Image: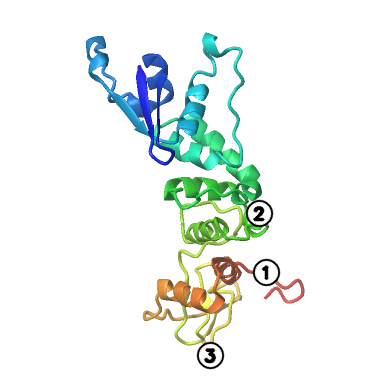
Amino acid sequence: MVIHVCDEAKNLKEDFVCPRDLLISEMKYFAEYLSVDAQRWEEVDISVHCDVHIFNWLIQYVKRNTKENKDCEMPILEPGNVISILISSEFLKMDSLVEQCIQYCHKNMNAIVATPCNMNCINANLLTRIADLFTHNEVDELKDKKDKFRSKLFCKKIERLFDPEYLNPDSRSNAATLYRCCLCKKLLTKETERRIPCIPGKINVDRHGNIIYIHIRDKTWDVHEYLNSLFEELKSWRDVYWRLWGTINWLTCSRCYQ
């Protein structure tokens, strides 16, 4: 199969040749267009709008195990090309390469954000997969002077705090049940509401003799408004994340167990 690559940015055109079976096994995007009927292959004209150097890298990767390429070096991921390759490989449904790029991003993010690459074209799905590899401490330690990616990672971490299905290694509790008490005005979750005192008088004793506190949910309080007001106050998603994390996680006193 001949693939015509048009690179509008550099005003270049180049043709690449790849065996059909190899193309559809490695770039699954093409599988639905390349019919099993051999007579129809010639009718298919493949044109790709992409950076020529990036597509050349991808074709080398596709042919990495073929006889004709046994003497060629395996193309390598670098801080300057990994984002372009990640986006292109996801579009072309090259699943194993996408996973390699995501793992590379996790290990080399400081070097990647230092290059002039555009991080805004990373979609929500890829962002989630990258963010899930980072602990919140690793995100905090990123050296991202121009804030190309760190705030995006913290926003994804905030989303994860509100996801009741997600087993979060960074947090013992999640914010899915977060609410404000209309009496004491404290922010609480299902895990913290029985531990944190309300106003005097709102106390019960359970059947084991333990003191439990009774809070009343403020139905006028909206979590989205709360997050927006936090961002207005703190001016960074990093600080919003840590404020929220500190609200839903707790430590117990070793003396009084409060």
Q: Earlier in the sequence, mark 3 or mark 1?
A: 3
Numbered label attached to residue 251: 1
* Residue identifier under label 3: 201
Amino acid type, residue under disc 3 in the picture: Gly
Q: Residue at x 26, y 21 (%)?
A: 44
* Residue identifier under label 2: 138
Q: Earlier in the sequence, mark 2 or mark 1?
A: 2
Q: Residue at x 35, y 25 (%)?
A: 4
Q: Nearer the viewer, residue 191 or 37?
A: 37
What x and y, as percent, mark residue 66?
52, 12
Q: Earlier in the sequence, mark 3 or mark 2?
A: 2
Number of other residues with Cα within 10 Å of mark 2, as a class: few under 14, some 14 to 19, many 20 or more: few
Amino acid type, residue under disc 1 in the picture: Leu
Q: Quadrant of the N terminus?
A: top left
Amino acid type, residue under disc 2 in the picture: Glu
Q: Tell us which disc is closer to us: 3 or 2.
A: 2
Q: Residue at x 50, y 51 (%)?
A: 119
